[in-house]
Amino acid sequence: MKRKLLSLMLVGTMAASMVACGGASSTDNASGEGADGAATAAVQSDDENTLTVYAWDENFNIPALQAAEKDYQEVNPDFHLEIITQSQSSDVESAVTLAAEAGDYSTLPDIVLFQDHYIQQYVTNYPDAWQDVDDADCDWDGLGAEKLSYSTVNGKHYGFPVDAGTAIFAYRTDLLEEAGYTMDDVTGITWDEFDKIGVDVYNKTGKYLLCMDGDGNDLFYMMLQAEGASQFKDGEPYFTENEKLVEIFNVVVKLAQDNVLYLANDWSDYTDQAIQGDMVAGVYNGNWIIPTIEQVKDNAGKWEITTAPTLTGAEGYASNGGSSLYITANCKKTDLAKDFLAYTFGGRSAEDGQSITYDEALTNGGVIGTCAAAAESDVYQQGVEFFNDQPIYADIVEYTQHVPTVEQSDYHYSAREQLATALQDVLTNGEDVEAALANAEQQLRFEMELD
Amino acid sequence: MEKKKKGMTLANKQLAAGWLFLTPATILIFIMSFYPIIQAFITSLKTGKGVNMAFANPLNYNYTRMLQDNIFMTSMKNTFLYLIIQVPIMLILAILLAQLLNNKDLKFKGIFRTCIFLPCATSLVSYSLIFKSMFATQGLINSVLMKIGLISENVNWLGTPATAKAVIIIALIWRWTGYNMVFYLAGLQNIEYSVYEAAKIDGANGWETFWSITVPLLKPTIVMTAIMSINGTLQLFDESMNLTSGGPANSTITMSHYIYNQAFGKGVGALGYTSAMSFLVFILVGILAFISLKVGDTRD
């Protein structure tokens, strides 16, 4: 009996310690942050003209920040921007979460680059982590109202836009031609017409006219925004009662069933197999997807971009993703940070129609800004060889001006996940559309703690 | 100190030495394990995020909320499905392999043992990623099956709920069978060969010896591997995270993966709720370990 008791205790402690390791991940991560201590020692600089910033993409947003540093040095020659590279955007989110949960903001740099769809939630959850920039000296009206709707919380500006998430619909013109269509045939059409063209393209070429990551499905959000509608109404999920959402959901189901839409299993399946594996004749996403499309050198000159179809046949303008720069609570040089950001990404240097920040961000990183004044420069007007010499940057800036502002929510990604789940339920489990949407809405309400 | 020690009896000295040796480990375990567990329990009674975190009203709010959470229920069903299918298959395979490799006349035993144990030396993340690319729509498995004519068009293994679950189970079996086999091999070394010889003389065939000698004598090892496997499966995370990302439509998500998603993965940061879910996993592991111990123990 004694032995049994002993072994029981042993098992108990074993189980307890294992759960402690596996389950209580908060402690794991807290210690992980401690390990970062060596790195965090350098997140702040003593020099009064130096600012530190977290960013994550060496081919995309880091060149943009370098351009901004160079731009600001024209007015403040002693200025230095220390860019601390993170491996992915979620690292920045985790850094803020951990600093806020630990109540110790000293681990954060002066400025962070942050994803637009997350910032509302982070300002709401951790209001102490940020400093508002409402009084910064720049022309907010010239930065794109839709873009600023993400970084404005409770009527206060918190961020400066870096890249526009303006959506593009890119088509392979050679494949369209094979099926007997031109770019004009796919511009300003309804989703029904798109479906017919898609069926023809699939039958003639074996390629899908549209693809999306089925796991993180951005189609619903973009398609709804193009209609000027949102998944939310007055801060609550708006699914089953939302006629446009129901209609769009049915369109997506039909596209998938007709082999017009390819739903990839996950993000890497989407980028590596679907887009770069040459499975598709069309891509619809934020313009940051362009570098992914450009990876396939063989298809240079075969792509062109246009607007998306809509339910009514009007040209569809939407936006997805993108990021902005925010000043953290840990920044002691707030005035310098505000002035730097207002001068560069806030567009003050672009007032004469040309800005080093925006020009070099585009040439070195392919970052397309939302500043209307900067888009008048020559760099934006050039044709791009990969896209059949179409001046896509100027076109994208043009699209940006038309993107309707729709209601944003802290629960953007939760809504996206629930709709993606509903779609999978309909497609693979044969569930009824109405039931699937009702279930998704109920699940989202649960997550938002509304019921 | 010196004086005190001199006054101690031998037994007391030994006792003191014992405590002395135990103290560092005890303190470490307390700080690294028990203290966080207590903290996690306190957190599990709270709701809200960041600065707004406060004790829930009622206090068991997170615990009752769990029961209404459809995705958490799905994740629980998935985890138990993996448990019920994978653990028995894996343990039976492991015991059979151990029996085969314990054969005295087998040549190149070392090579075979190494081969079967080798999967355990691979990192969980890397093997998950390799399985992912093998079972991709354009992956190796589809090409091979196409070439030998078993399927006529590519199967979307990871995109269909049933096959995605099957792939996870296959991956788990591949990764962990060798690990358990090693325990059985060690257990088999402790069974005297003379016992088998005696059985042989009495006319028992291979099957009978296996069931009447090997299995009963291996029982302690079987119980231990069962507990470890159950415990490991309940906390399954890497495969769900890396192989299928819980998809399609949460049909392969495990409890730990869902907990991670709610805490960090999707920027939700519901730490109170996730701590509560972690405690449920803790209790489940405790209950299952207790049951297997009861079932396996026949000493009194």
Image (cartoon, grey):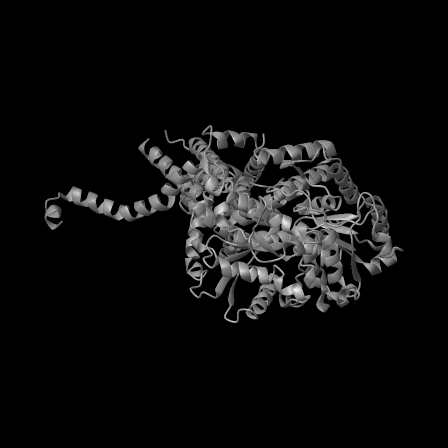
A433 to the left or right of A415: right
Q: Residue furthest right?
A: A180
Q: Quadrant of the N terminus of chain A?
A: top left
Residue sitting nearer the eye, A209 or B129: A209
Quadrant assignment, res A429: top right
Residue sitting nearer the eye, B56 or A210: B56
The x and y percentages for residue A283 are 75, 54
Residue at point 59%, 45% (across, down): A155
The x and y percentages for residue B270 are 51, 40
Q: How many marks?
A: 0
- Is residue B236 at all visible to an observer of this figure? no
Quadrant assignment, res A391: bottom right
B219 to the left or right of A207: left
Residue sitting nearer the eye, A192 or A205: A192
A11 to the left or right of A118: left
The x and y percentages for residue B83 are 54, 38
